Image (spheres, helix red, strand yellow):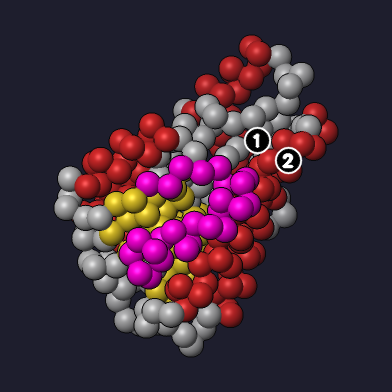
């Protein structure tokens, strides 16, 4: 696994490519000469990303699908194979958020969150493994979150999904040891994307309280998606097992390591002081 992963001439499948980190990753991959299969449910956003990527002179295909549609998801690898003949890089970037106290959260919303954040990641990875295994060198990249390392109050379902992605990815990496298939786990911190604005919340939550909570949370989202994408690409090229993005995430990792049970009391105090 010490051999550098060269992106030029490879084919990458990126989910959640219409905006945020997924769009930034897609454009950065295109600039490095990587052909792209881009997937998202946002058709208009996907067109914008694809058009920008094609300007770099690479082949790009657009796949509009909802990751909760199991049949469409499982058909995606064959569509990529038919278009490009193979696949060397899978980036499971797409994700959704669900805020609010656990006891106030609708179980149906938890099911939706898990379908997108965990089950789709596992299903697509499983479906792509034959294509990736057929390559001399290939890479899987799964995006967890800072909340796959720490678990704040009000994020029980989201943290559960991202801790699960972390566990799945680490186990898969261990299974792939000694092969040409590498596995990278990514923990982004506060990246300025629309995930918080698009998050589902308890239906009974007061609108004013919801707006105040969103504003407070978005103040923590300061890292540009392009900066996050650059860090992820460095991790792919060096075949890093884990990439932690942002000073906020690195501090939280250190605090959690030093205080594995009581870390939240210290982080909560620091947040109040910001």
Q: Which segment did they paint magenta?
A: 62-86
- Find numbered disc 1 in the image and state the secondary structure of the residue it sits on: loop
List x then y, in percent, for residue 136: 37, 83
Q: Kindly give the residue lying farthest to the top in the view shown.
A: 208
* Residue at figure coordinates x 79%, y 37% from the top left: 107
* Residue at figure coordinates x 56%, y 53% from the top left: 73
* 167 inside magenta stretch: no
Does residue 90 appear in this view? yes
Left or right: where 26 falls relative to 170:
left
List x then y, in percent, for residue 58: 21, 55
Q: Which residue is mark 2?
A: 110
Residue 204 vs residue 245, the one in the foreground = 204
Marks 2 and 1, the one that precedes in the sequence: 1
List x then y, in percent, for residue 89: 39, 65
* Residue at figure coordinates x 61%, y 60% from the top left: 123
Mark 2, Cα crowd under 10 Å, few <14 / some 14-19 / many 20+, is some
* Residue at figure coordinates x 66%, y 42% from the top left: 113
Left or right: where 24 falls relative to 152:
left
Q: Which residue is mark 1?
A: 98
Left or right: where 270 falls relative to 259:
left
List x then y, in percent, for residue 97: 60, 38
Q: Rounded to the nearest whole Å, what is the CA distance between mark 2 and mark 1?
A: 8 Å
Q: Quadrant of residue 104?
A: top right
Residue 181 vs residue 251, the one in the foreground = 181
Mark 1, Cα crowd under 10 Å, few <14 / some 14-19 / many 20+, is many
* 64 inside magenta stretch: yes
């Amino acid at each position: 696994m010490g051999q550098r992963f060269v992106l030029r001439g490879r084919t990458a499948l990126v989910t959640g490519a219409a905006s945020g980190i997924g769009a930034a990753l897609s454009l950065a991959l295109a600039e490095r000469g990587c052909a792209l299969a881009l997937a998202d449910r946002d058709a208009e956003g996907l067109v914008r990303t694809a058009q920008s990527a094609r300007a770099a002179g690479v082949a790009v295909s657009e796949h509009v699908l909802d990751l909760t549609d199991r049949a469409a998801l499982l058909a995606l690898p064959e569509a990529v194979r038919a278009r490009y003949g193979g696949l060397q890089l899978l980036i499971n970037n797409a994700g959704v958020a669900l805020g609010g106290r656990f006891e106030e959260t609708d179980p149906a919303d938890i099911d939706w969150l898990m379908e997108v954040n965990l089950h789709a990641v596992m299903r697509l990875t499983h479906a792509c493994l034959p294509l990736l295994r057929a390559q001399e060198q290939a890479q899987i990249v799964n995006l967890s979150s800072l909340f796959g390392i720490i678990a704040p109050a009000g994020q029980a379902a989201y943290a559960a999904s991202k801790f699960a992605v972390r566990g799945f990815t680490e186990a898969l990496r261990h299974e792939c040891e000694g092969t040409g298939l590498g596995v990278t786990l990514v923990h982004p911190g506060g990246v300025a994307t629309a995930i918080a604005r698009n998050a589902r919340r308890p239906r009974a939550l007061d609108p004013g309280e919801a707006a105040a909570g969103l504003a407070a949370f978005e103040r923590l989202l300061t890292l540009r998606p392009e900066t996050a994408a650059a860090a992820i690409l460095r991790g792919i090229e060096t075949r890093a097992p884990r990439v932690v993005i942002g000073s906020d995430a690195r501090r939280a990792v250190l605090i959690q390591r030093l205080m594995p049970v009581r870390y939240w009391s210290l982080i909560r105090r620091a947040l109040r002081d910001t």
